[in-house]
Amino acid sequence: MPLRFAHPEPPRPGARPRVYPVFLPQAGCPGRCIYCNQPAQTGQRPEALETLLARARAGALALPADAGPVELAFYGGTFTALPPPWPERLLGLAAELRGLGRVSRVRCSTRPDAVSPELLSHLRGLGLDLVELGVQSFQDAALARSRRGYDGALALAACRMVRQASLSLGVQLLPGLPGHSAQDLARDIETIAALAPEHSPELVRLYPCLVLEGTELAGMWRSGAYAPWGLPETVDALARALLRLWAAGIPAARLGLAEEQGLGVLAGPRHPALGQMARARALFLHVRELLAALPEPATTLSVPRRWQGEVLGQGNALREDYAALGLGVSVWAEAEFALG
Ligand code: SF4
């Protein structure tokens, strides 16, 4: 009797509004973090907020109205540390666009040490829906080595604070920071999983640390004081992270940085199909675990058609790994996977 099972990823919510990003490069940031080069990451130089506001309004109004409302996202800086009245003015624009039916939801990114219950509640009242916290890690040693200026306890408290303010929560992690190991990532993921269900994030982003030109990390890398994670260990660590998050019912929104032109990556685990590779390996690890628990060995993994492009990974790299488990992989018309 074959063992049937569903893909371990929690069911994805139905169609979500498209995210329309408004980048505010390094606006509100207390300094420049050692790995950060927002102009390279966002493809935009820092500019006056007045200019960014005007451009955001024009850009949002120029979106085709028949494509439906978007989710307006203020990214690339520390939104909650913007000097007044900028959070209010930017959320005022969002409210105006919401009134015109152009925006259905509003999110921002910020640092864990730039939020307070009062501020979050104020911003919630102005129409903010989701706060993405650039936690990067909950491990004190890694945070200290990257001079983030807060510790793991504060980062965790900030996550809870966002949910207690009735806002949705996003958590960004930066695996592979100086002093951050795969074990540290596993601990970070356990911390996030333990937020569920009461303070559960709506999404988690995993951005493996890359060495970008023009950053302090580039100097550390050149002097040999920092070595980024290799690609295979990154894929494996991300796969384990995904499995744990999925088991806690938490989706992962993005793996790896978007490839902007001129990103200037000097070193690090960069691959255009990183997400696909990690997802395929996560499924492989899941299958391996199920197989080990079977009373009798299985010889075939049957894969639903909708997953066939994802199971074997980039260039069918996992075919040999499945073969090493004694499994041939075949596609079938059923909706579930099966081991038999
Ligand atoms: S707080 Fe975020 S956006 Fe600002 S410098 Fe640091 S990493 Fe970059």
Image (spheres, rainbow, N blue to C red):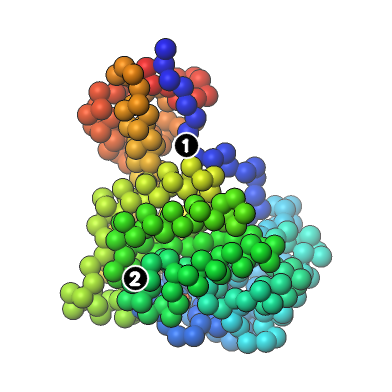
Q: Indicate the position of residue 127 as horizontal and vertical percent values.
A: 74, 68
Taking the view exactly as shown, the residue that stands out farthest to the right is 99
Q: Is residue 45 above or below residue 164?
A: below
Q: Residues within 10 Å of mark 2 (few under 14, many from 20)?
A: many
Q: Residue at x 37, y 54 (%)?
A: 186
Depth check, front residue: 225 or 307: 225
Task: Tell me the tag on residue 142.
Answer: 2
Image quarter for residue 285? Answer: top left
Depth check, front residue: 299 or 215: 299
Alpha carbon of mark 1 to alpha carbon of mark 2: how far?
30 Å
Whether residue 309 appears in this view of the structure is: yes
- Amino acid tagged 1: Pro
Image quarter for residue 131? Answer: bottom right
Please give left or right for residue 32 compared with residue 228 in the image: right
- Amino acid tagged 2: Ala
Q: Residue at x 60, y 57 (%)?
A: 199
